[in-house]
Image (spheres, rainbow, N blue to C red):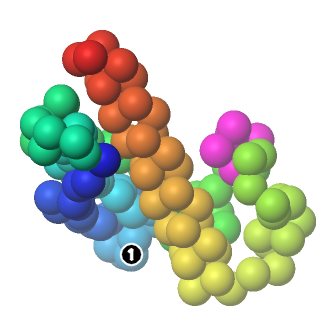
């Protein structure tokens, strides 16, 4: 059985405009996980710190619609230009957090496979 927890999650401004308004945010996560044999309750694998980070544009002007991260989303560059900064920030934060969790999952899977 795989169990775990988010040890910490931090979101902080990644870049600022000339008037100190955030243009992007950095999302950083650390997770700990344990793989346990259900029959014997023996710990098969454990990690205390797999980390991931992802940048999220907060305004349309900070977004580059040709990046692979953007192209995997269900948005087009023209859509972004019609959204408010709040909508851009919220959609890109969600996408960045999803990307970071996918990265952690992949690294956890690789680490488990090497540890077994």
- Residue located 23% across and 17% down the image: 115
Tell me if 46 is positioned left or right of 6 in this view: left
Q: Is residue 68 magenta?
A: yes
Could you say where residue 62 lies in the image, as x and y percent from the top left? Answer: 58, 58
Residue at x 30% of width, y 47% of height: 1
State whether residue 25 is above or below residue 67.
below
For the stretch drawn in magenta, the main secondary structure is helix
Q: Which quadrant would residue 29 be assigned to in this image?
A: bottom left
Residue 27 vs 42, above or below: the answer is below
User: At x 81% / y 61%, what residue is drawn?
Assistant: 74
Residue at coordinates 69% horizontally, 38% vertically from top-left?
68
Which residue is nearer to you in this view: 114 or 43? 43
Q: Nearer the viewer, residue 18 or 65?
A: 65
The magenta segment is: 66-70
Quarter of the image where one finds residue 39: top left
Q: Position of residue 28 (x, y in %)?
A: 28, 53
Q: What residue is disc 1 on?
A: 21
Q: Quadrant of the C terminus?
A: top left
């Amino acid at each position: 059985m795989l169990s775990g927890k988010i040890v910490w999650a931090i979101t902080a401004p990644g870049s600022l405009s000339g008037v100190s308004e955030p243009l992007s945010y950095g999302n950083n996560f650390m997770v700990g996980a344990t793989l346990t044999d259900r029959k014997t309750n023996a710990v098969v694998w454990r990690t205390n710190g797999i980390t991931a980070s992802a940048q999220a544009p907060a305004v349309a002007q900070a977004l580059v619609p040709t990046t692979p991260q953007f192209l995997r989303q269900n948005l087009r560059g023209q859509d972004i230009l019609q959204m408010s900064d709040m909508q851009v920030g919220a959609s890109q934060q969600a996408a960045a957090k999803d990307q970071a969790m996918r990265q952690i999952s992949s690294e956890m899977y690789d680490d488990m496979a090497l540890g077994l």
